[in-house]
Image (spheres, rainbow, N blue to C red):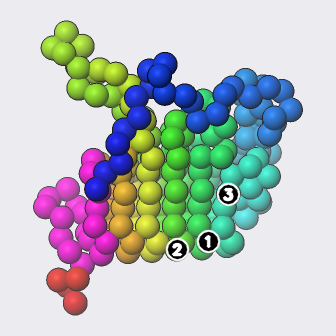
Amino acid sequence: MQPALASDDASIPSPRPAATFGDAGRLGDVHWRLLAARALVGWVSPFVASRVRTRLLRAAGIAIGKSSAFWGFPRLVGSGAIERRLVIGAHCGFNAGAFFELENSVTIGDHVSVGQHVTFLTRTHAVGPPGERAGARRRAPIVVGNGAWLGARATILAGVTIGARSVIGAGVTVIKDVPEDTLLTGAPPISIARWR
């Protein structure tokens, strides 16, 4: 079941008000610790200094479990305390080009493998009237279960939960929840349990 999408209108408070200088290294929406981390290792080849890159992301406030690594510096965008909206489990691997839009939370379980240029989008729009189809902005969390594998250039949209041990094929856009032990290749989903 998909979580309800939160509207961005004035009646719904932000996850956290805009920060002041000194609050976790931010001045407004500028994330100084993330900028410093990118300056230190963002220029380094993706497969060099993965552990250092991960330590710097932890120092910037992102919750990253034991033995997880980033090959290439991820792109993190959003307003407010984005570093508090990304939670990554233990023993995960993120290939080069990972993109996180953190207007809502992204929670990734243990032993998750993420291919090149995978995109996590926590904001979307409702379908609007004919004059403007991109209606009211909405945001919702993303959850990826333990042991999942996300193929290169997969896109995970707002409100999606990917079940444990599921495989998302390369280039697939995930628009709704994926059950556990499912292979999603763009055609109808196939249950991995049938392969056994």
- Residue 90's tag is 1
* Residue 138 position in % (x across, y down): 39, 31
What type is the residue that disc 2 sits on? His
- Closest to the observer, 49 or 100: 100
Residue at coordinates 28% horizontally, 28% vertically from top-left? 126
Secondary element at image label 3? strand
Q: Residue furthest bottom?
A: 196
- Residue 111's tag is 2
Is residue 134 located in the magenta-colored stretch of the structure? no
Q: Residues within 10 Å of mark 2 (few under 14, many from 20)?
A: many
- Residue position for label 3: 63
Q: Is residue 63 visible?
A: yes
* Residue 46 position in % (x across, y down): 63, 55
In this view, 160 is above or below 169? above
- Closest to the observer, 188 or 128: 128
Q: Are marks 1 and 2 in contact (CB under 8 Å)?
A: yes
What type is the residue that disc 3 sits on? Ala
Along the polypeptide, which appears first: circle 1 or circle 2?
Answer: 1
| Range shown magenta | 174-192
In this view, 128 is above or below 68? above
Q: Quadrant of residue 53?
A: bottom right
The span from disc 1 to disc 2 (Cα, nearest Å) is: 6 Å
Q: Residues within 10 Å of mark 1 (few under 14, many from 20)?
A: some
In this view, 21 is above or below 189? above
